[in-house]
Structure formats: C-alpha cells, structure tokens
Image (cartoon, rainbow, N blue to C red):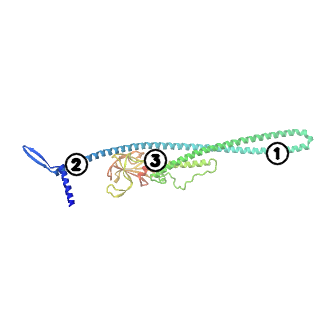
Amino acid sequence: MRRQYMKESWAERWHRYLDAIFPERQLHIRTDGDVKFIKVSQIFQLCVAVVFLGIASWVTFASAKFVLHQSVVASMDNQVSNAHLAYRSLLSEVANYQKKFVTLTKDLERNYKLMLGLVEQNASLQQNLHSVTNELVSTDTERKQVISARKTLKGKLNTIENEMSSLAHHNFSLKGNLSSIETDLQTALLERNEALFKTQQQDQSLKELKDRLASLQESQQDSVLRLSENTLEQISDMEKVIKLSGLDVKKVLKASNKLPRGQGGPFIPVKTDGQPAGDLKANLDNLDAMLNHSKNLKGVLQRIPLVAPLKSYYITSGYGKRRDPINKRWAAHYGLDLGSPFKSSVYATAPGVVTFVGWKGNFGRLVEISHGSGIKTRYGHLHKTLVKRGQKIKFHQKIGLLGSTGRSTGAHLHYEILFKKRSKNPMKFIKAGRYVFQDK
C-alpha cells in the first residue's frame, strides 16, 4: 500500500510539473466574424519541445564535427608539406654523399699511384745498397792484403836486423838498404791508414743509407696501413648495405661475374718473405686485393634499387601474406603497394635496361627493368608508360604515371624487386637506402 501511495505521489508530482510548464492552451482564430478555437494539448506541446531539442542538439553536434574536421584536415596538410620538405632535404643529402664517395675514391686511386712510386724508389735504393756492399767487400780484401804485406815486411825487417848484428863491418854498405826499407815501410803504413780511413767513411755511408731506408719503409708502411683501414671500413659499410637489403654478398658478386670461376678457399693475408721491404710488399698486395673487392662492391651497389619509386607515398599493402582486397581471402603478395595521387610520376630506382613494357594480366600496364647482377624491378597498375623495351634507363628517370589498371581497387603502384627470378621484400631495400644516405 505504501509503494502504491509513493507511485501515485510521484505520478501526481510529474503531472503537476507538466501542467505548470505545458498547460493546455487554446488558439483563437477569427475569420470574417467567425471565431474558431484550436486546442493545443499537453502531449502535442511536449512532442514539439522534444523535436525542437533534438534539432538543436543535432545542429550543435554537426557544427562541432565540422570545426573538428577542418582542424584535422589542416593538420594533415601540414604533415604532408613537412614530409615533402624532409624528402627534398633527403635528396640533397643523397647527392652530397654521392659526391663525397666519388672524391674518396679518387683520393684512394691517387694514394695507390703514390705507393707504386714509393715502391720503385725503394727498389732503386736497394740496388744502391747492394753496390755499396760490394765496394765494402772489395775494400776489406785490400785491407787484408795490406796487413799481410805489413807482416811480410816485419819479417824482412827482423831478418835485416839479424844480418846487421852479424855483419857489423858492412854497416855503411847496408845503411842505404836500410833507408830504402824504412821508406817502403812508411809508404806501406800510409797506404794502410788511407785504406782504414776509406773503410770508416764507407761504413758511415752504409749506416746512413740503412737509416734512410728504415725511415722510408716506416712512412710507407703507415700510409699503406691507413689506406687499408679506410678500405676495410668502406667494404664493411657496403657489405652491410647489401645484407640489409636481404641479399647475399657472395651470390650478388657471383651473379655480376666479379668472382673468378673455379677458385675458392679461406682468405689468408700475404706474409713477409724476410727480404728488405718485404712487409711493405705484402701490405701493398693485400691493399690491392681489398681495393679490387671494394671496386666490385661499388659496382654492385650502383645496380641495387635503394630508393622508393615515388617522391611521396604511403604503404597500402605490405609484402608477404595478406587478405586479398577483392575476394577477402588469404593470399601471397610478392610486392609492395604504394599509394599516391592519381597520375603521380613513377621513377626508376636504379640504372638498367627496360626488358618489358605493356599490358600484363592482373598487373595492368607494367614496366620491367633489368639492373644487372640478376636484379630486376617491376612497376605495375600504371596509367601511362613513358619508356620503350630495350631503352637504357638512368637512376631516378621518369618511366610512367601512377594509375589503377589491371586488377586494382584504386590508384596505387605495385612495386616488385626480383633477384635471380625470386621476389624480395622491397621495404628492406628502401630501409637499406635510408642507412646509406643518413647522417653519420
């Protein structure tokens, strides 16, 4: 009973509020002396109020949504302009790094020529050293002959003294002979002293030559070691870029015919043979091998596509397993779908030769470029192609316009990279290119 009383009290209170806010009203309409009354009920007034509140809420919500949408569009425009500026700065940095790399290669070639000149100077010094050694040997022989002659003369002097003691009565006759013998002895002593002096001079010259040769070898050795370290760093960086792109260094070099056939075995540096300048010769041989390897790697890098084919893009579908955009079934995707405005310019990602241009099934209009070393790139769903089959293509040359031909749901570019007819993930190549062109 109490609950029923409470319910009735709330109902009565609610009706009282409605009666106070929406009392029953009458509209008086007078036409040609006739007065008509239109009764506006409480329910009708309540419905009109609810409709009015709904319309006001909708207008408020739509206005707020419109303002928020405008701010989001403005922020997205700012982000797009910032991305364009960043990409242009990245392109300028790429050009600067290419110039630096060319300058460093020229410096290495000049240093290599300088090393070859130093080796030739070292060979001439070795010949001079050999001739000085021969002269020292002949001088030493002469010195020994003087010593033996001196001993002989001493024996003769002893004999003469004995004869003088036994033949005193012949003193006057022997004085002339003794004087001549003393003169001969003095002459022999002078010749011996001159020979000793020449020997000391030649020893000093030989020591100076050895010191000069040692200092020259040390400076040459330091230069070769510095060049070797720089070359090893360059080789390591280039091999790292190739590995980041998902390729095997040995396979790429073999595909580019840069490795001799029928050879192999572990790498063992050349050791010294114990001869003068042997360490320098061994280091120069090692440096020559490293420079050849660096040159081969540089040639391979010039043919690897390390940039995106569009100036601005967003990824609409990645490489690998995905849901088909048309039938929604799981399928394998052997490329990278890049979204961009319709008819955007499509650029070649590396120099090469066009091997296919035309319509190719689900790919629509397609361009295929061979870059050598077994590497190919494909550009599908193009709106228009700008190259011909057999045409030589430069790096970043415009080859077509982005479209939606073939089996496609909208404007985008299907980008593929193949190595020895096997597909590779293009995103790895783009990331490897970012590593090459980033600030160090």
Foreground pick, 178 / 224: 224
Position of residue 360 in the picture relative to residue 24 (left or right): right
Foreground pick, 167 / 266: 266
Task: Tell me how far mark 3 sits from mark 2, CA to CA.
Answer: 62 Å
Q: Give SS at disc 2.
A: helix
Whichever of labels 1 and 3 marks the residue nearer the N terminus, that label is 1
Where residue 134 appears, x then y in whole percent?
A: 70, 45
Whichever of labels 2 and 1 marks the residue nearer the N terminus, that label is 2
Name the residue type under label 3.
Val
Tell me the number on the disc at residue 436.
3
Whichever of labels 3 and 2 marks the residue nearer the N terminus, that label is 2
Residue occupying the point 9% across, 44% down: 30
Q: Is residue 357 visible?
A: no
Task: Tell me how far mark 2 sits from mark 1, CA to CA.
Answer: 144 Å
Q: Nearer the viewer, mark 2 or mark 1?
A: 2
Q: Residue furthest right?
A: 169
Q: Give SS at disc 3.
A: helix
Q: Residue furthest left?
A: 33
Residue topped by disc 2: 53
Residue occupying the point 89% across, 40% down: 174
Tell me the number on the disc at residue 118.
none
Tell me the number on the disc at residue 152.
1
Name the residue type under label 2.
Leu
